[in-house]
Image (cartoon, rainbow, N blue to C red):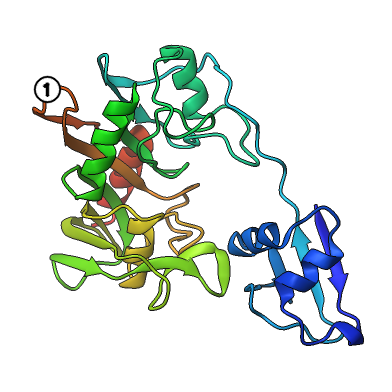
Amino acid sequence: MRIPYTVPPEDAGMRADAWLAGQMEGQSRAMIQKLMEAGAVLLSDRAVTKNQKTAAGQVYTVEIPEPAPDRAEPQDIPLDIVYEDADVIVINKPRGMVVHPAAGHADGTLVNALLYHCGNSLSGIGGVLRPGIVHRIDRDTSGLLVAAKHDEAHQALSAQLSDHTMYRVYYAVVVGTPRNPEGMVSAPIGRDPRDRKRMAVTAHGGKPAVTHYRVVEQFAGFSLIECRLETGRTHQIRVHMAHIGHPVLGDEVYGGVRKAVPLAGQCLHAAALRFFHPRTQEEVTFRAPLPDYFEEVLQRLRKTV
């Protein structure tokens, strides 16, 4: 639901977050700031920052999101289980599945499926909406992720994410061909200051992000690349590849849409996952083959060579 608020002359010069908090009954200033960070407060279709000043006659549009569910409920949803024991479960997530419940996605998520399959044996560190979830992949990205069945396993896996010892490899089809057949993109990622619903390479407020890439196969106007994540920022591969001029094919957010190859969602797959098992400390590796949608794209592109 979108609600407009017009600034009267006597309120000009106020901070936008403070002014909106005074206009919206039941909404605190902190909540307004969270809405701004999420890109839900707009002025002339541009995202508003919390320290922005109001001017007479301005019309702020606030999009009130649907309330997030209080907790996730078990649902009988099929899972592609690659590996499972008493400590961890490795899932090959299908394209189109959201990882955990949130506003707009109350159910039908990977967490709902895990709760049905695992019962109460999931770690609680992530809270009632993210039990067991150590790391995430985007809704329209397919492939591997690991969930923890108890808090000790969760802490051990999270530590590996933090110190970059968890090995994650993705395959992507990108627009064009990078100039160098192998390379590294080291550029901080944060919220796009012009559109808070997007991420962007930004010099201010971004977190360090490093992606290693390698060109695997070239086509007419496109390339298959392998990416290894050193860090794990939101939309990292999608943002980094767009940053160097080669957005992921099908990515409607970061510029990878090409009519020549119609595709709903980005062509990106988490193909390999390696970590030290939290109980045995042995290094374990898992792989997920390219899904049908990805293979179909490759077959079509190979006909253009």
Determine whether, in the image, residue 277 is placed left or right of residue 113: left
Disc 1 marks a residue whose amino acid type is Thr
Determine whether, in the image, residue 263 is placed left or right of residue 19: left
Q: Residue furthest left?
A: 282
- The residue positioned 25% from the left and 49% from the top of the image is 162
Of residues 302 and 274, the one drawn nearer to the viewer in this rendering: 274
Give residue 171's position: percent from left, percent from top. 26, 47
Regarding residue 111, the answer to whether it shows in the image is yes
- The residue positioned 59% from the left and 63% from the top of the image is 37
In the picture shown, does residue 238 fall above or below 49? above
Q: Quadrant of residue 47?
A: bottom right
Determine whether, in the image, residue 82 is placed left or right of residue 192: left
Give residue 79's position: percent from left, percent from top. 40, 19
Of residues 95 and 278, the one drawn nearer to the viewer in this rendering: 278
In the picture shown, does residue 55 fall above or below 243? below
Residue at numbered disc 1: 280
Q: Quadrant of residue 151?
A: top left
Q: Quadrant of residue 93?
A: top left
- The residue positioned 24% from the left and 39% from the top of the image is 271
Of residues 254 and 201, the one drawn nearer to the viewer in this rendering: 201
Q: Quadrant of the C terminus?
A: bottom left
Give residue 73's position: percent from left, percent from top. 58, 20
Determine whether, in the image, residue 131 is placed left or right of residue 64: left
- The residue positioned 64% from the left and 72% from the top of the image is 50
Which type of secondary structure does the marked residue at label 1 adopt?
A: loop
Q: How many tags in the picture?
A: 1
Regarding residue 43, the answer to whether it shows in the image is no
Q: Crowdedness of circle 1 by 10 Å Cα count: few (<14), some, many (20+)?
A: few
Give residue 228's position: percent from left, percent from top. 20, 52
In the picture shown, does residue 24 fall above or below 265? below
